[in-house]
Amino acid sequence: MRLLDVKVPHRHRLGGCAPPAFFACFSFLLLAPSGDSATLRGSVSDSQGRALARVSVSVAPAQPGGSSSAAVLTDSAGLFAFGPLAPGAYLISAQKRGYASAKYGQPDWNLPGTPILLAADSGFFAGIQMRRLAAISGVVTDENGVGLPDQTVHVFQTTPRLRMVAAALTDDRGHYRAAGLEPGRYLVRTAPAMLEAGRGLLPTFHEQTTTARDARSVQVHLDEEHSDANIVPMPGRLSSIRGQISGIGAASVTLFTDTGKRDAALGPGGSFSFEQLAPGPYDLLAEAPGAVPRSAWRRLSLGGEDAFVSLQLLASPQVSARCRDKHGKPLDNLFISIFLRRKDLTQETPSRLLCGETAHFSPGDWDVVAAPPSSFYIVALTPELTLRPGDKHEIEMEASSKPASLSGQVLTSDGQPAIGAPVVLNPLDPSLRSLLGGPRTTRTDHQGRYRFDGLPPGDYEAVLSTPKPVNLSEGQQLTLDMVL
């Protein structure tokens, strides 16, 4: 089949192809169609124009409920093909190890892609460019500038609580390299270590500090490597925590630090230990499963000394959800999900609790959010909990059956529906943001329409290419049309 490099007729272009900030116009190679089905072909290359083989390319309908998605691998020339496809709007994405995920037509690496509108008996050729993920490298040396081998280096995202995203081990010359990083700022730190003659090395950040507050972050970009994140670990005394659990059936002991968690195996009589600990705060958690789970929790602060801890297992904290309307009427039969997530970010998915339910949770600090049906909105909710063994807590949630809604149509500058356009609704008040659990995002349908339901009254921003202020009162159904 011969590829024709031609200008796409107006009827094949997405909304007349008038690009906003989120969108960009691209030239398509029109395929001479064969049969009655639409086809979608393309190529994948890197930022230098070299073909990328064995890239996983996926195509999916721009709106849920359409035809099923599919995936193929590019060939040695970086080419891919899909077909037959039903007429409609589609999104294309590409994934390859070591590269940032790419979406067709995205203005930047972390923004949505541009839907492709396929008519019957038509075809398109789409080019996708992928960029390598960033890397951080450097040298770990001793006090004389000599490279230290076998030293672990951790890379952390600069979130409120550090989250490790990569790790590397130094080679025989002390060199390390941590790859696969998204663009952004990171903190780089060595792990605690013991050298010969009992010399201890404290966890040390790049730019020679032991605290994240004083550390200097490293900024990286796609297709780049930051190559001078050098570290000279600071000497110091490393501590240990040893202890014993009283009670039968303890299954696990976990130590939570500012950079993650460590597990210890139980020894005879419920003994445990954690070695090579730097000065700082720690949370110690022991848990035993059962019909009534049991747990123990202790907060410690080490200053270079060793610690011995005796833990007594008690019934794990019990949490119940009490839901009511604005007039105090119980809503326990209403299907409202309440989600609890540990503040230490070690829990991958939140725990779920329904109105009227009671369940046991692990001790610790928890954030609380709720997800009501679209016919209700949250008026008030206990935002956070500190749970201790033996405690019983009640989450109080108040909901209203008069939520607001925001809907409208997104058009391009020449009046055509913008299909698959991302629309973000951003609550401006911190308390409102807490009730909603953060901003909400949706995409326009095949008619360019969008909708947000179940909204509390308050001030928002509707974000398309530029923010638009929105004030919602209780029960209001506001229509806001926007132009890309």
Image: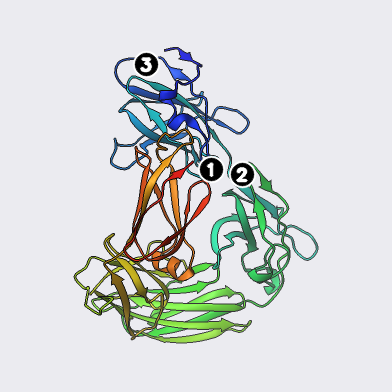
The residue labelled by disc 3 is 33
The coloring applied to the image is: rainbow
Secondary structure, mark 2, is loop
Which numbered tag is attached to residue 389?
none
- Labels 2 & 3 near each other (Cβ < 8 A): no
Quarter-wise, where is residue 425 in the image?
A: bottom left
Look at mark 1 in the image and give the residue it sits on.
100
Tell me which amino acid carries mark 1.
Ala
Q: Is residue 202 visible?
A: no
Say which quarter of the image contains residue 117: top left
Which callout, 2 or 3, points at the residue further toward the start of the chain? 3
Circle 2: residue type:
Leu
* Tags 2 and 1 touching, CB below 8 Å: yes
User: Looking at this view, is 124 or 292 the one in front?
Assistant: 124
Q: Which of marks 3 and 1 is nearer the N terminus?
A: 3
Residue 159 x/y as whole percent? 56, 63
Q: Residue at the location (50% across, 35% down)? A: 105
> How packed is label 2: few (under 14 Cα within 10 Å), some, or many (20 or more)?
many
Which tag, 2 or 1, sits closer to the chain's start? 1
- Above or below, 85 relative to 343: above
Q: Position of residue 393 (x, y in %)?
A: 33, 82
Q: Label 1 neighbourhood size at 10 Å, few (<14), some (14-19), many (20+)?
A: many
Q: Which residue is drawn at 66% across and 78% down?
A: 237
CA separation in Å, label 2 and label 3: 37 Å
Q: Mark 2 points at which residue?
A: 222
Give the percent coordinates (x, y) of residue 288: 33, 76
Tag in front: 2 or 3: 3
Residue with the most extreme top position: 2
Q: Where is residue 129 in the image (x, y as percent from the top left)?
A: 55, 33
